[in-house]
Image (tube, rainbow, N blue to C red):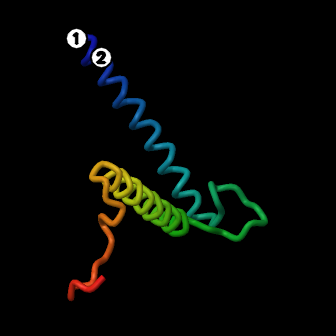
Amino acid sequence: MAGLFKMVIGIAIGAGVGYALAKRASTDVETGSTYGVASDVPPTGIKARLQDAAHAGQTARAAREAQLQERFRQRVHDPQAFTAQDPSGAP
């Protein structure tokens, strides 16, 4: 029963936070300013934030892939693993 109560409280808190963030985002669109606050900084809006998030995601993904490739190279004791090779077989 306690687990159900925690779940209901979590859903209520999540819905409240989601509503507040959606309200802030709609204010950003209407005012054209960052976080709904007028400033001297050029307006960025939601599109710029989404582009920034996408770029950060791509950067994080590339870094994680490089990390996993290096870990694999160390485990197989082959520093050339995951490197492009000439299809003709020439070194």
Q: Residue furthest front?
A: 91
Residue at the disc numbered 1: 1
Rendered position, 53 above or below 21: below
Residue 30 sits in quarter: bottom right
**Residue at image x 74%, y 66%?**
41
**Residue at image x 43%, y 64%?**
58
Q: Which mark is residue 50?
A: none
Q: Residue furthest bottom?
A: 88
Q: Indicate the position of residue 79 as horizontal and vertical percent values.
A: 36, 61
Q: Residues within 10 Å of mark 1 (few under 14, many from 20)?
A: few
Q: Indicate the position of residue 65 as horizontal and vertical percent values.
A: 37, 59
Asked which secondary structure carries label 2, the reply is helix
Q: Indicate the position of residue 28 as horizontal and vertical percent values.
A: 58, 60
Asked which secondary structure carries label 1, the reply is loop
**Residue at image x 37%, y 30%?**
12
Q: Indicate the position of residue 61 as horizontal and vertical percent values.
A: 40, 59
- Disc 1 from disc 2: Cα separation: 6 Å
Residue 63 sits in quarter: bottom left
Left or right: where does residue 67 sit relative to residue 90? right
Residue 91 sits in quarter: bottom left
Observer-nearest residue: 59 or 68? 68
The amino acid on which the numbered mark 1 sits, given as a three-letter code, is Met
Q: Residues within 10 Å of mark 2 (few under 14, many from 20)?
A: few
Residue at the disc numbered 2: 5
Quadrant of the rendering where the N terminus is positioned: top left
Observer-nearest residue: 62 or 24? 62
**Residue at image x 45%, y 43%?**
19
Rendered position, 20 above or below 70: above
Q: Residue furthest right?
A: 40
The amino acid on which the numbered mark 2 sits, given as a three-letter code, is Phe
